[in-house]
Amino acid sequence: MENKVKPNGTATFTVAGKTAELPVYSGTHGPDVVDIASLNKQTGHFTLDPGFTSTASCESQITFIDGGKGTLLHRGYPIDQLAEQSDFLEVCYLLLNGELPSQTELADYKHTITHHTMIHTQFDRFFEGFRRDAHPMAIMTGAVGALSAFYHDSLDINDPQHRIISANRLIAKMPTIAARAHKYSIGQPFISPRNDLGYAANFLRMCFAVPAEDYEVQDVMARAMDRIFILHADHEQNASTSTVRLAGSSGANPFACIAAGIACLWGPSHGGANEAALTMLQEIGSVERIPEYIAKAKDKDDPFRLMGFGHRVYKNYDPRAKVMQKTCHEVLDAVGASNDPLLPIAIELEKIALEDEYFVKRNLYPNIDFYSGITLKAMGFPTEMFTVLFALARTVGWVAQWQEMIEDPTQRIGRPRQIYTGAANRDYVPVSKR
Ligand code: CMC
């Protein structure tokens, strides 16, 4: 990657009588950044920012979010345009290569991905090592990490061709692995991919067909699945992506790095929120009980939070949530579940929260996970699979960000510092004297 940050003056920082001159850079969009890399050298001080709320960890040309305006761009293209007019594999190509493909490039890319969806039969035996009741995210973490035990031929991270082969393998095989994680947990035989189906349709069929009866993929379902994949494809330097970059900064192979990303995504504050949002709607159970839960969410002595609300970066309506809400209605209509009792609860909860002073003051809006749980449930997925679908879709973002990091000439191993507040230096006391 060719670095593109532009110098935009300097900032002066004075601490304990020492002054540092720090470069300021401008990107294409977003706030300018102060480059503090030389601060320690100039003043002997570190900075402290535990949740990275004021810290950019890298330069990136992939995704831009304006949390105040509620904007999300991939390589400059707004997410709603991509969700309405593109398809997931085209978005994958865009994220990985920086530009939309020509017709030939797109056809070639789709052919490559389609023809690498099968996994080695020996690999299938890994699944049998898991308990039947294992969470599919546990299976995903293990199985994706195990890909590095299979594909020794593409593990040289310094070889651009190896990086492309690994990227293609991950994107092509992730739906097959995810569908197997699902089939394994419900005790059904694995269904092989079929090359005459598109990426999303193929995944749905691998999840829902059984040897005794094929699964006819409805267009509306394939389109909804594809759109859900697009909406989750990348989200700049979030927790799991930063995990992938940090793991990759040591030179670890891409399969190991993506497995680390999957583990991070599993948490309820990140990818696990769609499962948590649906569970919360089920627990609320009726529109009448919403005020009780709103009060719980506002009570500082109660750990309860409205799941599917709030975001570290968006302080406006999550642009993905708007598309997700529309997709949710389309799917519910198609499966005849528009009378799902959870939908009126979700709509009323959203309305009340958007008018409530507590949520308004803190800019807490629905995020993508608020409507994705209801949608995925209507499509037939059990709640344990929700985060797996997120991981499947986010794989391309992780890979694109990992590739960008490896190609960045300024890349070094990630190594944060700390402020130490433990015991001061003291002498060891032999056990006989304690
Ligand atoms: N319900 C009630 N209060 C909330 C919520 C919520 N969902 N989210 C934030 N707050 C309050 C929080 O208590 C704090 O109040 P105060 O200023 O009085 O102390 C204020 O809003 C700021 O919250 P924060 O915890 O400092 O914000 P954060 O940026 O650290 O956390 C978050 C962001 C997404 C973890 C958080 O909003 C949350 O836990 N939301 C619910 C879980 C969820 O839906 N996560 C999905 C995120 S989107 C998908 C993804 O990126 O993975």
Image (cartoon, helix red, strand yellow):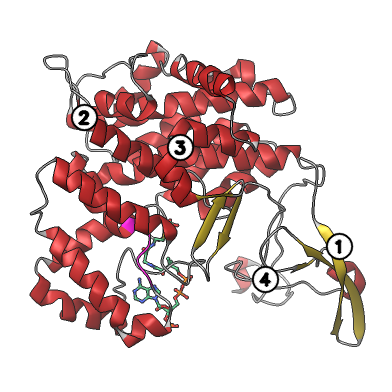
Q: Is residue 244 above or below residue 434?
A: above
Kindly indicate whether the residue at mark 4 contacts the one at mark 2 (C-beta within 8 angstroms): no
- Disc 1 marks a residue whose amino acid type is Pro
Overall secondary structure of the magenta section:
loop
- Disc 4 marks a residue whose amino acid type is Val
Cα separation, mark 2 vs mark 4, equals 72 Å
Which of 292 and 366 lies nearest the eye of the viewer?
Answer: 366
Q: Earlier in the sequence, mark 3 or mark 4?
A: 3
- Disc 3 marks a residue whose amino acid type is Ser
Q: Earlier in the sequence, mark 4 or mark 1?
A: 1
Q: Earlier in the sequence, mark 2 or mark 1?
A: 1
* Image quarter in which the N terminus is found: top right
Cα separation, mark 2 vs mark 1, equals 52 Å
Image location (x, y in percent) of residue 332: 17, 47
Report which residue position mark 1 lands on.
Answer: 7
Report which residue position mark 3 lands on.
Answer: 86
Mark closer to the observer (4, 1): 1
Can I make out residue 130 in this image?
no
Can I make out residue 394 in this image?
yes
- Disc 2 marks a residue whose amino acid type is Gln
Which quadrant of the picture is home to ligand 1?
Answer: bottom left
Mark closer to the observer (3, 4): 3
- Classify residue 180 by image quadrant: top left
